[in-house]
Image (tube, grey):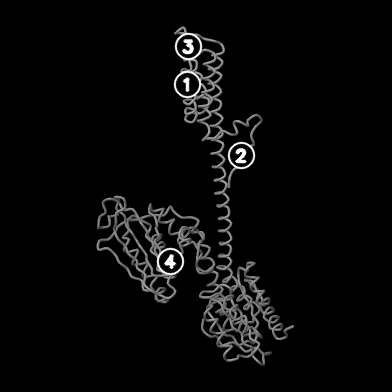
Amino acid sequence: MGDVAIHPATEARRRPSVLIADDSAEQRWTLRLALSMMGFDVREAADGRELFWALEEQSRLGAAEPSLVIADVYMPAYDGLEVLEAWRDSMAGRAVIFITAFPDSVVSRRIESLGAELLPKPFSLRAFSECVRSTLRRARAPS
Amino acid sequence: MRAEHAPARSGAVVIERINRRSVVPLALGASLVIGLGDFATGVEVAFTLLYIFPIALGTWFRGRAFGNTLAALSGLLSAADEFAWRVEHHMHLHPWSMLWNHGGSLGIFVLCVEVLRRLRAYVEGERQSRQLAVEQLRHAERLNVIGKLAAGIAHELGTPLNVIATNAELVDTERAPPELVHRCCRLIIDQSERIASIIRQLLDFGRRGGSDRQATDLGAIVESTVRLLEPLARKRHVELEVALPKEPIIVSVNHLELGQVLSNLALNAVQAMPKGGRSLVELRRDQERGHPVAVLSVSDEGTGIRPEDVPRVFDPFFTTKGVGEGTGLGLAVAYGIVADHGGRVSVATEWGRGSRFDVILPLPYKTSATLPTV
């Protein structure tokens, strides 16, 4: 799936960045399309390793905060949970949504302890955008 | 896990103490008591020791071999025979001696039968508890399999389903940019096909056999399958090498099924080498216990299989790959197909060094180098 020219959303003045990590190219393409229309600046990672390096680069460059990470739980190389648990200490201002088709109790507990959101697959576009908005709102205004 | 013994019935305290170890000294002791009784009642002691004890022992062994009813009849017959012999030879028959002899003989017999019954009950209990344990294990395994299958299906189907749902919503709400609508639809079609293919694969696992077989050159199957897999192997930096014998090996097989076996094994080999490497697909003739066989072996220099996982590699849905990478059906399907062809699959592996899977197919005794005319 190559890059796609997406119409910029009208309400976005400062485009927040979002990182999508999923091993399914089709899934990434679809989420990229949806998020671009919501006015996000989208980057992709195809597996756990790419996700790790993308996070590394993001923290080095001090990317625009708050940033959103949407990661699949099960991925080749390292799974999304492993990578984000490794980044647990520098999670400040970073909102994380995990998507998985099989959220068992162990996975749910780990996601909860990370302070991340869990969005079970399959989800509707409305549920997805609602989840993205509420997660970002919470990350912007930490209680 | 041990079976609970049935509680002893009333008055069976002595019998309770009887087991395999104590039965012989008890029988000897009983014979001695009877012998002393004989001596007191004026019957020759040698008779008891020489006849009653062997009769009882014989009854016991017969009981083990043929069942208690037959043994009881035979024991009574022996006693009657002995009685008749005495009458015939005009020997002294004292009523007390009769009671001693036959009562003692009966007592020993009952003792032996009781011991036998106990032993049988014990063995039966052990057998039942073992069967129960096996049943429980199977049940646990089934639940385990169902859980794994559920996780596998949820992930395998969840992602394409999600792509379909989201893209359909994008098109439906006319939020997708017009030039991308076509692509969204294309994705929906592709993902539906992917779901269909996963379901087909699962169904294939369920129904096998009844396939039409033809005399086929195994080398040709190897070549065509490896050619199919080469692009994927190259992408993962794996070099697929092929070693074929000079003479073709002709076997009556279903070439599609055999191709599936080989591609499943070769895919595993490729996936076992995440850092790339070399995988050898070798076909050769061999002998196994005097029978000619064709051996198709696929070896890799990958991660190998953990020793504790080796007995389970052919189990359906057993996988060490991440969810989504493998359904755990590949080796189970391969094993089933090879077994349908009268062969077997064996595995040799070393953790950290690599694995080798051998498909062993029986060959007819006279194999011609040419394909028979059909």
User: Closer to us: mark 3 or mark 1?
Assistant: 1
Give the secondary structure at mark 1.
helix
Say above or below: B61 vs A100.
Answer: above
Q: Position of residue A103 (x, y in %)?
A: 63, 69
Indicate the amino acid at tag 4: Trp
Indicate the amino acid at tag 1: Leu
Indicate the amino acid at tag 2: His
Q: Is residue B186 visible?
A: no
The outermost residue toward the top is: B90
Q: Give the left or right position of residue B367, taking residue A34 as reference.
A: left
Give the secondary structure at mark 3.
helix
Mark 3, residues whose alpha carbon is within 10 Å: few (<14), some, or many (≥20)?
few
Q: Position of residue B191 (x, y in %)?
A: 54, 71
Of the image marks 1 and 4, the number of the one nearer the N terminus: 1
Of the image marks 1 and 2, the number of the one nearer the N terminus: 2
Whether labels 2 and 3 share one chain: yes
Which chain's residue wears label 1?
Answer: B
Say above or below: B39 vs B188.
Answer: above
Q: Which residue is mark 2?
A: B5
